[in-house]
Every structure is written in structure tokens, then in C-alpha cells.
Amino acid sequence: MVLSVVDEEITVRQHTRSYIRASAAFVAAVAIAGGAAPAAHAEDAGADLVISALPKATPKPGEVYGQDVVITNKGTAAVNGVSFRMRLTRGLDFPEAVEGCTYSTVEDQVRQAVCKIDEVVEPGASIKAAVRFKALPKALMEAVEYGTGRTGETPGEGFTDSYRRLALTADSSADLVAVGDDTEALAGNWQSVTVALRNDGPGWIRNQESDDQPALMVHIPAGTTATEVPKECSPFGIDGPSAPGGTPGKSTYVCTPDDHTIEVGQSLLYTFMLKIHADAKTTTSEVKATSVYDIHPAFDKNPANDKAQIHIAIPTDNEEDPTTSGGSTGGATDGGSGSGGNGNDPQGQAAGGTGASGSATGGASSGGSDGTVTGSLASTGSDGIPMVAGAAGAAAALGGLLVVAARRRRAGTDAS
């Protein structure tokens, strides 16, 4: 009998410990999930403000948008005073200053107003707040944030039932323009090309609702290889970027700024360094104003200037070089000595050559402020033009001075 009582007591104690452990595990699981034990109900009490949604709008530049929103207390406690905040992207502005509001500009040129509404909002009651803004001349793809915190405090970041966001498109457009390059190079050398994406307005550009941001598509000319690529330019695959920006050796790239923003009148410059193949001939390719997924932007109503060319003139041994004095290919004619030299031979500067045409260039140049890649050839002349140095022994073996005429970049497309 004694053993039976002891065994029963041990069993009761074991069940009690199991129940305590199970209860503790349940409470811990609720805490990890971010909640509380059902018996607490502490968060059910208090204010709970919600705000109505603004209707969609497509304001014309210069127009003022004005709507009231309704703030309702769906909680169980009253709210004594509401801090109401509005934020506007850079194509919008507040039409006038309102008493009780504090105005500022925050990150990314966002205009902000924080207004104090001195009213008590009882449970189940509602108040109204006015949202007013005007569309600036450069308005296009915009967004408006508005509302308060759940208990009437100034809202934090992110959106809730008490703090909302309205995306809108102004009744306007923006004209994306592709800018190409026109240059010359020697086969076997390197050559930089600078292309650009320009916004001729009137609207500034940033897509507020999609990652299909504006971009410049760049096709690398046949007979060349991109050896240095701007970090803002990613290889383009079947339907979008396919590798990190700056990856060399691909045939097609899409270039876009990190912040996806193009202001009115702004040109985004992208400079590529190309290796000209030894057997390359004069070559042309296309650049196009588009999007990172190669979709024509709906806001661009002028497709006529969406495309431009990269043109690289590559002289051959059979071409007459118009920059060589006398137009003769039989030898140096302007201060040089010897005979039989070809003015287009890339080994064309021989020892002792003093003629005006006794230097050569691959046309290497520096690009613009955005995505610039610079390159140079073996050396640089006094006028800043890179030169190709030939071997004196090779020139002597040919029995004459070989002249390579300096070819400068033709005045072509203006990327400014």
C-alpha cells in the first residue's frame, strides 16, 4: 500500500510538471510570434485611427488639387490632438502656407508639412483634414503621402491604415533623347565612345510605381569588344538586365542612373572603351532611349529622337588618308624622308621622322561626368593626342619613314 501511494504521488507530480512546461512553451511561442497570451487583452484598449483614401487624379501642370480625408477613431480611447503629415515628390508643391503647419524639405527633394489638429477624437467619431497641393511645370510621375499615427502621433516610415500614399501621373510628358557618337580609330587599337540619354522635358522622370525605369540601350559596334564598361550599364539579356553593371565583353547594355532619376535638361553620359579588332572595318551600331526592360515609356510622346548611332570610321591600307599632305600614299610628303611608307600603317612613326604627319592616334578620349571611363594608347603627344610608337628597326628595314596621320574625333553629335 505504501508503495502505491508513493507511486501515485510521483505520477501526479510528473503530470503537474508537464502541464507547467507546456504552458510555458505556449507563452514563449506567442511571444516569439510577436503577440501576447490570449488572457492579456492589453492591446485591445486604446485609440485606433484610420484614414480614408484620396481619389485618383491627373492634374495638369499649374493646377491645384484639393480634397478632404476623413480620420476615424475605431478604438476605445479618445485622441486629444492629431499630428497630420503630408509629403510631396519634387514635381508637386504646397500652394500656400497654412497656420499650424511646419514646412521642410527632406531627403530626395521631398516637400513635407506637419500640421497640428487641435481636436479631440472620441471613439467612433471622425474629423476631416485637407490635402492640398499644386502640380509644378515639371510634374509627371508623382506621389503624395498623408495621414497620422495610430494614436494621433506623427507617423513613422511605412504605410498603415492611418498613413497612406497616392501615386499619380500629371497630364504631361517627357521627351527622352538618345545621343550617339561619331569617331575614328585604327584597327588593332583602343577607342572610347561616349553616348548619352537626355531628358528634354517638360517633365522630370522617375517611375514611382515600377522598376521598369528609363534607360539607354547601347549596342556595341561589330568588329569591336567592350573592354571597360560604366558601372551604370548592365548587359542586356532576353528581356532585361542579365549581369551586374560594368561587366565587359557583352554585345548589348542598358544604362540607367542608380537613383533612376533624370531631371529636365539633364544628360547622362556613358563612356565605353572598345578594343578595335585587327581585321575591323568601318562600323556602325545603335543606341536607343527605352527602359531597362526595353519597353517604350508611355510618357514619351516623341519617338522620332529615340534612336542614334555609334559610328566608328576605320581606315584601311587601300584608303587615301585626306589628312596626309599631298594626298599621296607613296611616302611621306610633309617634312618626312624616305619612300614607300603607307600613311595608314599603325607602325607609322619611324626614328628620325619630323614631318607634320608623323604621329598617330587611336582617338582615345575621356567621357562625361557620369559613368566615365578613360583610356589611352602607348604615349601622348604634346597636343594631348595619343600616339602609336613604331619600332625604329622595322622602319629601317622598310627603307623609309612610315607615316600615320593623326585622326581626330570629328565634330559630331553634341552630348550636352
Image (cartoon, rainbow, N blue to C red):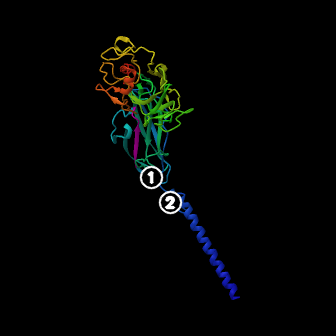
The reply to whether residue 173 is visible in this rendering is no
The three-letter amino acid code for the residue at tag 2 is Ala
The three-letter amino acid code for the residue at tag 1 is Ala
Furthest residue in direction bottom, as rendered: 2
Q: What element carries label 2?
A: helix
Task: State the residue at coordinates (49%, 52%).
Answer: 75
The one nearer the camera, 225 or 336, is 336
Magenta extent: 81-91
N-terminal of the pair, mark 1 or mark 2, is 2
Magenta stretch, overall SS: strand
Q: Which of marks 1 and 2 is in front?
A: 2
The reply to whether residue 296 is visible in this rendering is yes
How many neighbours does mark 2 have within 10 angstroms: few (below 14), some (14-19), or many (20 or more)?
few
Residue 99 sits in quarter:
top left
**Quarter of the picture holding the C terminus:** top left
The one nearer the camera, 314 or 394, is 394
The one nearer the camera, 136 or 276, is 276
**Looking at the image, do the residues carrying marks 1 and 2 touch, with CB atoms under 8 Å apart?**
no
Q: Position of residue 119 (x, y in %)?
A: 40, 47
Residue tagged 2? 42
Identify the disc placed on residue 78.
1
Q: Where is residue 400 in the image (x, y as percent from the top left)?
A: 36, 19
